[in-house]
Amino acid sequence: MAVPDASPSDSPGEQLPIETARALLAASPDALLQLDAAGRIAWSNGRLEAACGQPPGALQRRDVRQLLGLPPQAALAAAEHRWTTPSGTQRWLSLQTPGPQLLLVQDITDVRALGDEARRLAELLDMAQEFGRLGVWERDIPSGEGRWDRHMFRFFGLDPAGGTPNFARTAQHIHPDDRVDPRIFESMTEPGQYARRYRIVMPDGGIRRVHSQWEVKSPPGGGTPTRAIGIMVDDTEAYELAESFNDTSAQLKIAVDLGNIAIWRHDLKRNRMYYNERAYQVLDITPRPEGMALEEVRALIHPDDLPQVLATSQAALRSDRPVDMEARYRRPDGSFRYVLTRRVVRRDAEGTPIEFVGVALDVTEQVEHTRRATEIAKRLEIAATAAGLGIWSRDPQTRQAEWNDEMFRIIGRPKEAGVPSGAEWMGEVVHPDDRAFMERVRDEIRASDAVSVEHEYRIRRPDGEVRWLVNRVRRELRDGRPMLFGITIDVTERVKTEAALRSANERIGLAVRSVGIGTWEWLPRTDTSVWDEAMFRLRGLEPSDHVPNEAERAALVWPEDRERVAAALEESVRNRSSAAYEFRVVWPDGSVHWLASRSTAVTDASGQVHRHMGVNWDITDARSAEIARQERAVAQRESSAKSEFLARMSHELRTPLNAVLGFAQLLQLDARALSADHNHKVEHIAAAGRHLLSLINDVLDLSSLESGNLRLDLQPLALHEVVYETLPLVEALAREHGVTLHADRLQATVRADRIRLRQVLINLLTNGIKYNRPHGRVTLTCTVDATHVTLHVADTGRGLRPDQLPQLFEPFNRLGIENEGIDGTGIGLAVVKALVERMEGTVMASSQPGTGSQFDVRLPRDDAPAAPLPAGARPAATTPARVPEPAPGERRGQVLYIEDNPVNVLLVEELVRGQAGLSIESAASGEAGVERARELQPDLVLIDMQLPDFDGFEVLRRLRAQPETAHIRCVALSANAMPEDIARARQAGFDDYWTKPIDFTEFLGGLDRLFPPPSSV
């Protein structure tokens, strides 16, 4: 490859040697190319080959446009051209043609990167100044000449066109109370750093609070200071917000100065953090130009805050919007500083995140001194950092405007659509309901001399969403021409919150008024109280402007509660605590009402109680309900105790009665073995036993009815069927007394319990028979109306006097005939009344002395089909009959009786052995009985429910659990005769439940059902 000819010179002797020219061209950092007429490379100094990773001369004859990625006819001149090398590296080139067919290619990648970095730093500096409301100034010493940036002129309200004011003129703008001797500014003879806070009086009279910091510098060699440089931070908004939101903020110095603002950068590729000097000061770490490793920084974050920091970092990566976060950072001395940061992700041309750029503010002082107003502090910090502000400017004359990106985001307008015109703004952006208002605001801004204006309005985004905005507009002169500068804040959430709070307050107020809650306040320092209307009404008073004083309030309290109420309030005041108590008040009409009170002490910023707030509400009904509940609980406990006592007494009485009645019946069955006198005595024993058993049954029934434990099965019943079931049960008694029974057709259906209705009829018929005259009559008739059926039981007995009728249904009251030798307990009619009422009916009695009595049982009528008569419902006769002697071989059966009482065992064995074909064995404990059942494999097991080792339920469970005995029929034979005992046993799986004392007829009838003779099978 030939080196281009050296340029001719005036003297041939001055021409460079060819080798020297080649060396100079090769040493050039830029690529030098000689092209032919077609644009192909004829010669190169090798720099382009090196950039392509090729040896010198390798690119000869290559089309330079194709090599550099240019269109075929493109001019070979470009200030900036992005080129992808053959290796894939992106480089920026500058193309120049210094002469015909010559091309100079300069690699400006690094220069461009330095320019990007310079612009980024300038953006960061401008953001920091906007973030911290910061102005920069400097002055020469001793000339006093100075230079201010635009923010300084804005702080003082001065026109930049007037130039930077000198010391004296500057001092004139300082508030008189903060003004200092101008000579202090003029005699800056001592190098050092200085700071001062003061107020600036604006030309319009407004006040601006600033924090100025400056440093007086000497020449590098020392000597008299030659210049001063400084910064000034506008603290006005922080002061105004603090005074607006918190009464105690006057004690707090909420000022955001440069010392609290840090700038940082997180290199995502190297995972290193780079801070400015102020950031290191916040962390109390020696500045490190090389930055800090990410893990080292994260180790400084409080463990409780680290998850939030990591989450915020991820959120920022997913968004291009700024993300705010507050976290605690540990200093070397172990203390933590609260730091509020804002970050935004920066991406490369491909959209890949390359770094976080952010600012930080040390807010430790605000957090520590305003914990009681956390939300206010957050708003203040966000306001101080200008978070989420749309920034714009407009020239009223040219109507030209500029928006930042945040402004487009707030409005919901794509940036490529550009800033809307005034007509578009009013017609498309502003909410239709607010357009007239905004037009008036626009006209006021144009006509008024006011510097700043603030207004709130609504917009409608392109997607239809309505948002609330606040505009703060400032008019300033720029180049002698008025300009409008403003910020826009999206306050939609605040407006919604305020609306929600108003709605919540209204709902709370409505709820308080609806439920009758009274609210009150008491100011201890002035001893004044405030009551709402409900407080008066809770005491039976009409609302009044006059709130009762302490003595009058005490007079309204029930005397027994006054001391307790006073003590509770005194303790609340003394301990600055809440109080909760209940008390009674006496209304003017003398009625007593229970009130509940809840109150709390409210302290001021110094911790002193400045008022008590509380509520009262009426709890009279709740108190009454609680008393009723307690009374019910006592009644239930008493009922349970009574039921338990009666059940125990029933068992204890039935056990000996089983022997008395059982052996009396055995003797009666074998009457031929006894003399007539002995038979008569046995009959007395049996009658006494039956009387005692009847008394026990009646007492148990009455107890069950009174406690509500007796369960009834109400169903449609044919009245005549129940009557015909009952008559055979009293026929023997009627024959004994010579009384005739007569029942009408009784064609009616009632809703009742079959067994209990039969019990009612037995009691009424028995009374009609016992208290009748010889050859008397008992008649049953009924009448039917639309809703009820009334059964009439009339007798021709002695009758009752009118004074006896009210006592007729009293338990144990036999109305003076208990000594006349007529069998009875005095409980039967009480049981009748209770049973009829439980069946939703009534019973009444009428009587004429010497004529007879009539009982009217009124029960609900039921037109539904009557329940079928249960199998075997018609009872057999109740008098013991001689046991027939079955013929041998008629039936076979094995019975096992598990019973620990030898008398009961003897009685049952006598009965069973008297039945041909049946055999019986006994076991005296549950364990022995289960084992014997497994060995014997009986056809029937009779089980007593109270055994010495375990109860009858356990015996049944074990028998059912063994495959060998699971199929055996088991019948409970127990003196536990309470209805709940019987129901529980049947539910547990017993095949039947027979009670003691044993009724021979029922017992033997049960055996016949279980072991029927072959002829009846």
Image: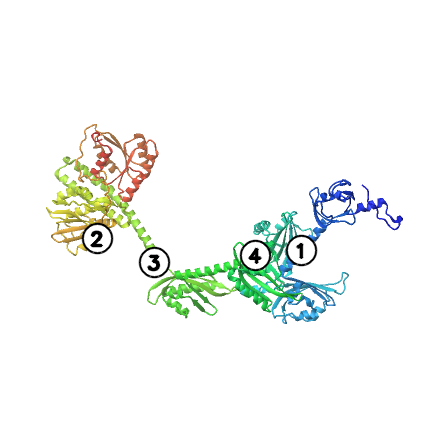
Q: Comparing marks 1 and 4, which lies closer to the viewer?
A: 4
Find disc 1 in the rendering and name its residue.
276
**Along the polypeptide, which appears first: circle 3 or circle 2?**
3
Q: Quadrant of residue 84?
A: top right
Pointers 1 and 3 in contact (CB under 8 A)?
no
Viewer-nearest residue: 10 or 812: 10
Secondary structure of the residue carrying numbered label 2: loop
Find disc 2 in the rendering and name its residue.
810
Q: Is residue 963 above or below residue 273?
A: above
Secondary structure of the residue carrying numbered label 3: helix
- At a point 61% along the width and 57% down the height, the residue shown is 404
Viewer-nearest residue: 251 or 916: 251
Mark seen at residue 624: 3
**Along the polypeptide, which appears first: circle 1 or circle 3?**
1
Q: Comparing marks 1 and 3, which lies closer to the viewer?
A: 1
Looking at numbered disc 1 in the image, what kind of residue is underneath it?
Answer: Asn
Pointers 1 and 4 in contact (CB under 8 A)?
no
Residue 24 in sight here: yes
Looking at numbered disc 4 in the image, what kind of residue is underneath it?
Answer: Ile
Position of 712 with respect to 214 (left or right) is left
Residue 253 in sight here: no
